[in-house]
Image (spheres, grey):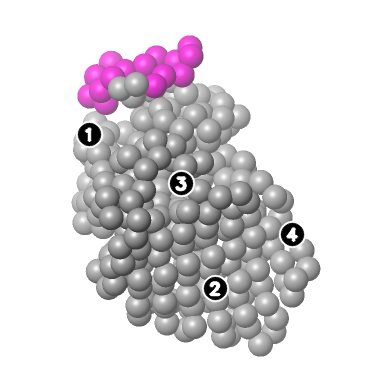
Amino acid sequence: MATPIALVGIGKIAVDQHVPAIAASPDWTLAATVSRNGSVPGVDSFAAIGAMLAARPDIPVVSLALPPVPRFAYAEAALRAGRHVMLEKPPGATLAEIHALQALAAAQGVTLYATWHSRVAEAVAPAKAWLRGKTVTRAQVTWREDVRRWHPGQDWIWEPGGMGVFDPGINALSILTEILPMPVHLTAATLTYPENRQTPIAAALTFSHGVSAEFDWRQQGPQTWDIEVDTPDGTLALRMGGNVLEIDGRRVSGRADTMGEYPTLYARMATLVRTGASDVDLAPMVHVADAMTLGRRVVTAPFEF
């Protein structure tokens, strides 16, 4: 029997990914939404999470798909009410608040799942398996997309805590930290800020072990989500955000779409709840925090939607 779940934050990512994934899942039924502006037809809707938690004690799981800055208060309220919590990426605005949520979930005896949807892309696990035991001589991440396409009119992305280009860039970092056979750390960064915005529109990152990354939110036309890794045994490339795997230029697995990621996340959440476990890996967010600390700031032209 499917378990009732509440979805908090009915914006673009919820409508495009969360709602369809829940609808297709044998594990969940969407029983309530919380949003000031959005709703899902036929589903009980609330404007505040406190009202939902009080009115629907039958819902044991809450999935949070709202922006990172307000998310802590919502997650804390749900955990204190004894509900299991699933977090959209990035899991929060700061590392410290996620540590606090981890401690609270453990004290309450409930599940906390910090999701990384790109990490469960079709070709990530085969890439990790191919790299296991190999020596990486160079790795290059190229993540370029159009902010107007993916975040139309969403000014929160440019405010403190919105992360700017690291909102998509952290997807690449979630894959990188999963597939590399060794840990890496940031050694230098250049962050490019529009003169009228508080978060970067582009970033160039240099890591240890010959690893580098380029993120840019100004690319129009076809989008680029690539990771290339050189080893003495050959070159691995992940395309389409981790959904297509190439070895030495030859496609060996994957599919050219991203629609399988969120169903996998919701299946994972069902397993965590059944087994009484949590899954909170903050490695991708650590690299973002390090870039904000270590990065050199460059100012570019103003940005407007």
Nearer the N terminus, badge 3 or badge 1? Answer: 1
**Residue annotated with mark 2:** 140
The residue carrying mark 1 is: 77
- Quarter occupied by the N terminus: top right
How many discs appear? 4
Marks 4 and 2 close (CB-CB < 8 Å): no
Distance from Cα at disc 4 to Cα at disc 2 = 20 Å
Q: Nearer the viewer, residue 131 or 12?
A: 12
The crowd level at tag 1 (other Cα within 10 Å; few <14, some 14-19, many 20+) is some
Label 3 vs label 1, nearer the camera: 3
In this orientation, does residue 237 appear? yes
Q: Which mark is residue 147?
A: 3
Q: Quadrant of residue 48?
A: top left
At 22% across and 34% down in the image, what residue appears? 77
How far from the left and from the top, in percent, is residue 157?
34, 45
- Please check the rendered image and state whether residue 140 is part of the magenta-colored stretch, yes or no: no
Q: Seen in the image, is 110 located left or right of residue 104?
A: right
Specify which label sits upstream in the sequence, 2 or 1: 1
| Pointer 2 or 3: first along the chain | 2
Please identify the quarter of the rendering in which residue 33 is found: top left
Q: Which mark is residue 154?
A: none
- Please state if 268 lies on the left or on the right of 295 as rendered: right
Find numbered disc 4 in the image and state the secondary structure of the residue it sits on: strand
Graded by Cα atoms within 10 Å as few (under 14), some (14 to 19) or many (20 or more), the crowding at tag 2 reads some
Inter-mark Cα distance, 4 to 3: 29 Å
Q: Which residue is mark 4?
A: 253
- Please tell me whether residue 63 is drawn above or below residue 164 in the rendered image: above
Mark 1: secondary structure: helix
- Kind of residue at disc 1: Ala
State yes or no: discs 1 and 4 in contact (Cβ < 8 Å): no
